[in-house]
Image (cartoon, rainbow, N blue to C red):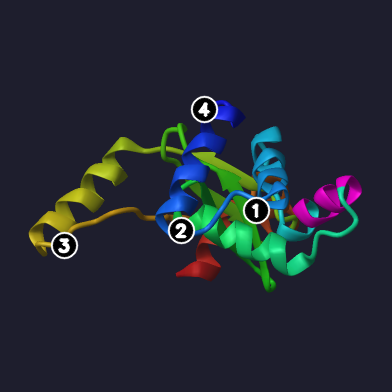
Amino acid sequence: MQAEAALGRFRAFLAERGLRLTRQREEVLRYCWSTHEHFTADEVWAWVRSRDRRVSRATVYRTLALLVEGGFLEKLERGRDEALYEHVLGHRHHDHMICLDCGRILEFRNDEIERLQEEVARRHRFRMLRHQLRLEGYCSRCARRHGGPEAAEASSS
C-alpha cells in the first residue's frame, strides 16, 4: 500500500476517534511507510525532528500507538526494553525469529502454523483478530559461537 492510501485510511481512523491528522502525525506515518525495515520509536523521532524541531518524543510515541491500534503498524517486543515497528497494512502476515545475541530478525511464514492456530481458536470458540508468533534463539552465525545448533537445542530442552 502506498503512503498516500495509508494516509487517507489513517485520516478516517483518526476522525472516527474525534482526532485530526496533524502535520506531525502525517510525518510519522510517512517515515513508517518510507522503509521496509523494522524501526524503533527513537529512529522515527530522530527522522521527524530532522524535518520539524518542534515535534516531541511523546507525540511520536502516541502516534505510533494509534498506528498500532488501527492495524497500520505491528509492534514487535524485542526484549531489552526495546520495541520495533513495521508497517503491515497491505502486507501479508508473517512471523519473526529473533536472535538473542546479534538482534537479527528473520521473517517467515508457515501455512501449517497458521492453520493450527486457526484450528485451536475455533476449537475454543475464540474469535481471533490478530496474532504474533516470535521465536527467540540464535541465528546460524551466532549459534556457532554458542556451541553450534545442537548446543542451542540442548539448552532449550
Mark 4 and mark 2: span between their CA atoms? 18 Å
Q: Are the residues tagged 4 and 2 within 8 Å (C-beta)?
A: no
- On the image, the x and y values in percent for residue 70 come to 45, 52
Disc 3 crowd rating (10 Å Cα; few below 14, some 14-19, many 20+) is few
106 with respect to 156 (left or right): right
Q: Are the residues tagged 4 and 3 within 8 Å (C-beta)?
A: no
What residue sits right under mark 2 in the picture?
69
Mark drawn on residue 126: 3
Determine if residue 146 is in view: no
13 with respect to 53 (left or right): left
Mark 4 and mark 1: span between their CA atoms? 40 Å
Determine if residue 23 is in view: yes
Q: Residue drawn at (56%, 58%), measured in percent from left and top?
A: 76
Span colored in magenta:
44-51
Disc 1 crowd rating (10 Å Cα; few below 14, some 14-19, many 20+) is some
What residue sits right under mark 1 in the picture?
148
Tell me the quarter of the picture where residue 133 sits: bottom left
Whether residue 18 is in magenta: the answer is no
Disc 4 crowd rating (10 Å Cα; few below 14, some 14-19, many 20+) is few
Three-letter residue code for mark 4: Met
Three-letter residue code for mark 2: Glu
89 with respect to 148 (left or right): left
Tell me the quarter of the picture where residue 4 sits: top right
Which badge, 3 or 2, comes first in the chain's sequence? 2
11 shown above or below 146: above
- On the image, the x and y values in percent for residue 38 come to 66, 46
Quadrant occupied by the C terminus: bottom left
Of the pair 15 and 70, the residue shown nearer to us: 15
- On the image, the x and y values in percent for residue 112 come to 27, 40
What residue sits right under mark 4 in the picture?
1
Q: Residue drawn at (43%, 59%), measured in percent from left and top?
A: 17
